Image (tube, rainbow, N blue to C red):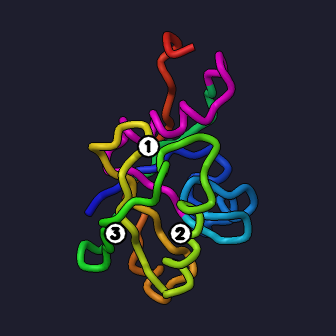
Amino acid sequence: MIVYRIAARAYAGDLSGRGASMYGGRWNPKGVGMVYTSATLSLAALELAVNLPPGRIPNHYQAVEIEIPDEDITILHSLPEQWNGFPYVPHTQQVGREFVKKDGFVLKVPSAVIPSEYNFLINPNHEKIGLIKIKDQRPFIFDSRLK
């Protein structure tokens, strides 16, 4: 399966989960590494855009196309209460912590931006991480009308 992420040029090829570990996210608390990817490039762009300061149009990002093994995807069937709220609720972060703790590899979760579409969270410390392949990496420029 092909998934996408958009990252600053300096970190585009980094699948270590360090950024998510440093700051935490919807599905992981600080200290737990996770690589956030999306089913489509457009969803990856929206996921990034909602986390940028208003009016900021970055020009140093890369679109990264990543191949993940289909057979190693776990689907999250039960969502915690207020899973798509902001700020993030501890319940969703606990889901990610438990997934990593139980040695899960890839977790499919709905997007809070578009709940009918999906993000794929990769555990960068899983023994199968070598199966994850970056297939393509290219500049990504946001349309200036998005400001």
Disc number placed over residue 96 in the picture, else none: 2
Q: Which residue is mark 1?
A: 112
Q: Which residue is mark 3?
A: 68
* x, y percent for residue 131: 39, 79
Name the residue nearer the viewer: 92 or 118: 92
Going from N to C along the chain, the mark reached first, 1 or 2, is 2
Hey, what amino acid is under mark 2?
A: Gly
Residue drawn at the location 61% of the way across and 49% of the way down: 88
* x, y percent for residue 30: 72, 64
Q: Is residue 99 magenta?
A: no
Residue count near mark 3 (Cα–Cα under 10 Å), binned few <14, some 14–19, many ≥20: many
Question: What is the CA distance from the residue labelled 3 to the residue labelled 1?
Answer: 22 Å
| Region rendered in magenta | 35-57
Secondary structure under the numbered disc 3 in the rendered image: loop
Residue drawn at the location 49% of the way across and 77% of the way down: 99
Is residue 11 in view from this perspective?
yes
Secondary structure under the numbered disc 1 in the rendered image: loop
Name the residue nearer the viewer: 134 or 145: 145
- In the displayed orientation, state which residue is furthest to the top: 145
Hey, what amino acid is under mark 1?
A: Ala
Q: Quadrant of the C terminus?
A: top right
Residue count near mark 2 (Cα–Cα under 10 Å), binned few <14, some 14–19, many ≥20: many
Secondary structure under the numbered disc 2 in the rendered image: helix
Is residue 137 in view from this perspective?
no
* x, y percent for residue 126: 51, 84
Hey, what amino acid is under mark 3?
A: Ile
Report whether 86 appears left or right of 142. right
Going from N to C along the chain, the mark reached first, 3 or 2, is 3
Going from N to C along the chain, the mark reached first, 3 or 1, is 3
